[in-house]
Image (cartoon, coloured by chain):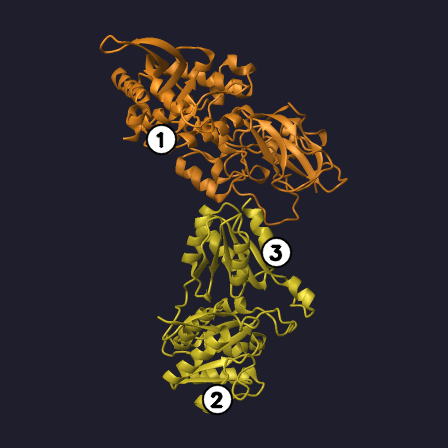
Chain colours: A orange, B yellow
């Protein structure tokens, strides 16, 4: 008996559409549960899809670069040489003539009776769930683990909204059930017309920027930080031990943020939530578009740990192998346009965060000292955009001042 | 409390000796228990120590001498019987079920039934279908019987002491391939209460609920998989009373459970354990509760087939892998 594997939800994508980037199996291959069968691109990243079925691949249901929705048939496995049981790809409406809606109780009515009689196994059952149903099935008829149903009750969500899940045959697992209100996540139902032609990463960026533009009341503060001494320290010592300015700045930003809770916060439906930890988003030009991996608990990491973590994340972002969870949970974001000679700019707040720091280029400038003494110093441009709904100008300026002072006297961090 | 390392057989022998010494009402009888010291040497040396009035051999007449024990228990003695093979207890079903299990109830609690029947159980020694069955599930079905299935020397000792002192009929299942299993046993008046399952191994991903000697197979598989998954093992210890609270609590903490039991799969003890989990821990389950049990056939005599009949470590490993993927 052949079995159709449905495209599972992979990672924490906010969209149901994925693009098949590459098939890793071909018709005739024997596969096990857990084998990687395809690489797909979601709106967040490129991820590997593991098989939920075992057997010989009889059919691949899509070509590379095809776009599929979660729950669509991905491939069919069975015994070698077995005939593929034809299944309607798009639910009842695409059913073959011999298998019309009137013969298929599931397709005929999305409202299943609450209790299905499963006691008599010899009674012909409607085929197991294949393809997307025309409407979301009622919550009693969908496959979900008891733990997933409990979780849905706890967060006040309808289990049907998480269909199909990541388990076998689209079974909803506990981890598929998320809180129904996720501020910042674009809702597919409210997609504006202009986004219709956009796909993948571009579409996510567009929707998030539009949301930020529509909601945030942005104010950008700009000033310089004197990084002369910091650079001298970074460039001293063995060449192999040299650290880069960006990693030092990230360390200083993270540790300064700990002292400025209002900037290290989320604006959520329930209010402003200040975070005790700093998860630093770091904007990367990822080839397919802007991508923001997260340096988790950056406030607790030393410069070498930050450098290592950042290097790994950037490599993954460029190689499109960033796991979905690596872009989640940022409490503050840093965007660096300095390498392009930009001195200052107005970065866009990444909801539900309340502020973002733009880093500009370093410049050699003649500085007038306190006793009118002239000296050549290196200055770094800082651009802090904050959401005035959540933060006022003074606390934002205090943060920026603290940051600039600490960058100028990095050894104060040792005190 | 100091401990001593001994086998399950030695631990049981020790407890019988100390209980017989402490309480003159404790007597032992059955086939081959006295002069031969028991088919599995559990009553070895007791005849020399306590004499033929306290421990004696019976004819091959299970219904007769079990009935005698019911009468003895009813009138104030505390008999400990040796059934040699639990399969032979089928000859004494009327005495065990109709009489021993029911008399306390039918007299409104006016009588006690302090009777222990030792039931060497299980397959794995090529004793064939009539000497290898796992019958504790059948007895656990009968209200009024206590059904005990220890897995370690310490539990064997502690549960046997509790059994001898209990006012109810207790069927005490000792796996016949496990008498030589060694472990530390607390010295002194060590008892283990009925109705308390034991967490034999902590685990956060999957819980294996095991009965009797299969606890050790489950632990072995859990250790083997320790790099891949955190597998806990729960030792049921007594089927009646069954510690449903601990059972459900432990399974709820992982949400994934495999019940391992040597009894036949269909209508076996594994089914009751799985049902109790489904009732008590349903909201925490990530997957259906699975069973790894003895096959639904008589126990084969050929060692290769007997091995195939029994739950295997490899099969358990596969099942756990299938869950924690």
Residue B319 place in picture, x, y as percent: 58, 51
Same chain shared by disc 2 and disc 3: yes
Q: Are marks 3 and 1 on the same chain?
A: no
The subunit letter for the residue under badge 3 reads B
Q: Position of residue B237 (x, y in %)?
A: 46, 65
SS at mark 1?
helix
Give the alpha-carbon distance from disc 1 to disc 2, as whole Å.
75 Å
Instruction: State which quarter of the image contains the C terminus of chain B.
Output: top right
Residue B146 visible in the displayed image: no
Q: Is residue B256 above or below residue A103?
A: below
Determine whether the residue tagged by mark 2 lies in a helix, strand or loop.
Answer: helix
Above or below — where is A391 with respect to A103? above
The quadrant holding residue A180 is top left
Residue beneath disc 2: B47
- Work out whether residue A38 or residue A8 is closer to the camera in this orientation and state it: A38
Residue pointed to by mark 1: A299
Coordinates of residue B205 in the picture (x, y in percent)? 49, 48
Residue at position x 64%, y 68% in the image: B299
Res B271 → quadrant: bottom right
Q: Is residue A273 above or below residue B291?
A: above
Q: Which residue is mark 3?
A: B314
Q: State the separation of the CA atoms marked 2 and 3.
A: 44 Å
């Amino acid at each position: 008996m052949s079995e159709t594997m449905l495209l599972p939800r992979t990672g924490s994508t906010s969209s149901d559409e994925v693009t098949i980037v590459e098939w890793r199996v071909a018709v005739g291959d024997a596969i096990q549960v857990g084998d990687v069968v395809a690489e797909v691109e979601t709106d967040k990243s490129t991820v590997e899809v593991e098989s939920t079925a075992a057997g010989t691949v009889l059919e691949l249901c899509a070509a590379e670069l095809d776009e599929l929705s979660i729950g669509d048939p991905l491939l069919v496995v069975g015994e070698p040489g077995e005939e593929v049981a034809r299944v309607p790809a798009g639910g009842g409406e695409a059913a073959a003539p011999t298998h019309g809606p009137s013969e298929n109780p599931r397709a005929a009515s999305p409202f299943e009776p609450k209790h299905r009689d499963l006691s008599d196994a010899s009674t012909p059952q409607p085929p197991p769930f294949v393809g997307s149903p025309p409407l979301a099935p009622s919550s009693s008829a969908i496959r979900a683990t008891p733990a997933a149903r409990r979780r849905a009750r706890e967060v006040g969500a309808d289990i049907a909204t998480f269909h199909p899940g990541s388990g076998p045959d689209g079974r909803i697992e506990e981890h598929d059930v998320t809180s129904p209100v996720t501020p910042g996540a674009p809702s597919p139902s409210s997609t504006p017309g202009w986004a219709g032609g956009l796909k993948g990463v571009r579409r996510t960026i567009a929707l998030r920027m539009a949301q930020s533009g529509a909601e945030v009341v942005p104010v950008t503060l700009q000033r310089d930080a004197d990084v002369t001494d910091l650079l001298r320290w970074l460039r001293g010592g063995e060449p192999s031990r040299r650290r880069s300015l960006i990693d030092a700045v990230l360390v200083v930003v993270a540790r300064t943020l700990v002292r400025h809770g209002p900037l290290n916060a989320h604006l959520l439906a329930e209010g402003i939530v200040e975070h005790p930890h700093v998860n630093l988003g770091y904007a990367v030009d990822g080839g397919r578009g802007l991508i923001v991996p997260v340096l988790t608990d950056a406030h607790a990491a030393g410069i070498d740990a930050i450098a290592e973590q950042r290097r790994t994340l950037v490599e993954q972002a460029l190689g499109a192998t960033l796991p979905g969870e690596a872009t989640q949970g940022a409490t503050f974001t840093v965007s660096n346009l300095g390498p392009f000679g930009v001195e200052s700019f107005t970065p866009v707040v990444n909801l539900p965060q309340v502020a973002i720091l733009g880093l500009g280029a370093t410049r050699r400038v003649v500085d007038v000292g306190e006793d009118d003494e002239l000296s050549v110093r290196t200055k770094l441009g800082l651009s802090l955009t904050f959401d005035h709904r959540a933060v006022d100008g003074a606390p934002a300026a205090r943060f920026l001042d603290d940051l600039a002072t600490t960058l100028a006297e990095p050894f104060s961090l040792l005190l | 409390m100091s401990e001593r390392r001994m086998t399950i057989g030695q631990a049981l022998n020790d407890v019988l000796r100390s209980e017989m010494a402490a309480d003159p009402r404790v007597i032992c009888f059955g086939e081959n228990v006295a002069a031969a010291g028991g088919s599995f040497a559990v009553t070895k040396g007791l005849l020399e120590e306590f004499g033929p009035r306290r421990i004696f051999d019976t004819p091959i007449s299970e219904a007769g001498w079990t009935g005698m024990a019911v009468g003895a228990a009813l009138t104030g003695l505390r008999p400990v019987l040796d059934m040699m093979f639990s399969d032979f207890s089928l000859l004494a079903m009327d005495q065990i079920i109709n009489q021993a299990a029911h008399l306390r109830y039918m007299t409104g609690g006016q009588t006690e039934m302090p009777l222990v029947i030792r039931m060497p159980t299980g397959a794995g020694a090529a004793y064939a279908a009539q000497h290898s069955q796992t019958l504790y599930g059948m007895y656990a079905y009968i209200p009024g019987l206590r059904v005990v299935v220890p897995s370690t020397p310490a539990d064997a000792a502690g549960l046997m002491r509790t059994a001898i002192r209990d006012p109810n009929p207790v069927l005490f299942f000792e796996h016949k391939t496990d008498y030589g299993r060694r472990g530390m046993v607390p010295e002194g008046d060590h008892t283990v209460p009925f109705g308390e399952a034991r967490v034999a191994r902590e685990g956060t991903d999957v819980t294996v609920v095991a009965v009797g000697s299969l606890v050790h197979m489950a632990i072995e598989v859990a250790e083997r998989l320790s790099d891949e998954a955190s597998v806990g093992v729960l030792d049921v210890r007594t089927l009646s009373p069954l510690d449903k609270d601990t059972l459900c609590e432990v399974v709820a903490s992982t949400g994934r459970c495999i019940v391992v039991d040597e009894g036949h799969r269909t209508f076996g003890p594994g089914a009751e354990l799985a049902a109790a989990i489904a009732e008590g821990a349903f909201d925490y389950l990530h997957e259906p509760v699975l069973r790894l049990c003895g096959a639904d056939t008589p126990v084969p005599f050929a060692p290769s087939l007997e091995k195939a009949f029994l739950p295997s470590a490899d099969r358990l490993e596969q099942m756990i892998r299938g869950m924690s993927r």
